[in-house]
Image: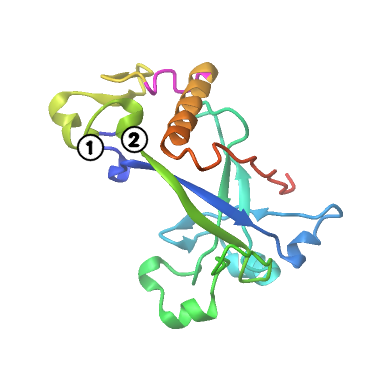
Amino acid sequence: QHCPRKFNMERLLRFKVTARSTAKLHGQSPGGRNFDTFVAFDQAKCTVPNCQKLHWDAYGYVVGCQPNNVGQVAVPGSPTWYSLPGTCPNKFYYEKTAECNAAEPGGFCPTSNVTGTGNCTYYFERAGELRLDDLTGLKDYNKVCRSSGVLEFNMDTDMGVGTKFWNGKTDAAAGSQRTQTVKALFAQKYPNMPADLDDPTCDVPQ
């Protein structure tokens, strides 16, 4: 729908994420709880009221989750939003200082050994990327979309112009095919990496 793409996006990045709940959060449920409620971040700042008191002080810098609204795009499975608090999470990225980063370290662990302490609840590492142009077949889309007339997707017609990748944006069969295409391209490009990992259950009480 955007020409060029929103924020001039060019890549689909994949990450391998390891997460572990803190003892305080895990004890909130008889069977153990792995995730806090999702909190929104805008420019690296938590924009939900009372983030510090309701989340960081209560449980540590834990990972949050929230089932995604799939009404906008058909995606198989259970797509989920995750919130991962970084350093100085109560400030915008341009307000962060070394002192704040030290006082509010966030939950990112220095290594893949995720301990579940208040400041070590997750670790992520790059697991490959795909060019969006390779998915749609539109080379240099952000540069040529205006001059060439191509468009990845038109909300009014539910189709693209010059590409079919996003046709039927809310169609379940089309969404499943798009997902399989992405998985196949990742497997082809990164044959030594797992094609997929099971998604953890978002166990936040509804």
Pointers 1 and 2 in contact (CB under 8 A)? no
Q: Is the magenta stretch mostly helix, strand or loop?
A: loop
Tell which residue pokes out farthest to the bottom in this image. 99
The magenta segment = 165-171
- Residue name at image x 57 percent, y 67 percent: 109
- Residue name at image x 40 percent, y 59 percent: 43
Local secondary structure at mark 2:
helix
Residues at marks 1 and 2, CA–CA distance in whole angstroms? 10 Å
Please provide percent x and percent y for residue 158.
38, 18
Q: Name the residue under label 1.
A: 142
Tell which residue pokes out farthest to the right in this image. 30
Whichever of labels 1 and 2 marks the residue nearer the N terminus, that label is 2
Q: Is residue 182 magenta?
A: no
Quadrant containing the N terminus is: top left
- Residue name at image x 67 percent, y 44 percent: 200
Please provide percent x and percent y for residue 50.
59, 66
Tell which residue pokes out farthest to the left in this image. 147
Bin the neighbour count of mark 2 within 10 Å (Cα to Cα): few under 14, some 14-19, many 20 and up. Answer: some
Quadrant containing the C terminus is: top right
Q: Name the residue under label 2.
A: 132
Q: Is residue 17 above or below residue 137?
A: below
Return the residue nearer the eye: 54 or 128: 128
Relative to 144, 88 lies left or right: right
Which of discs 1 and 2 lies nearer the camera? The answer is 2
Relative to 183, 7 lies left or right: left
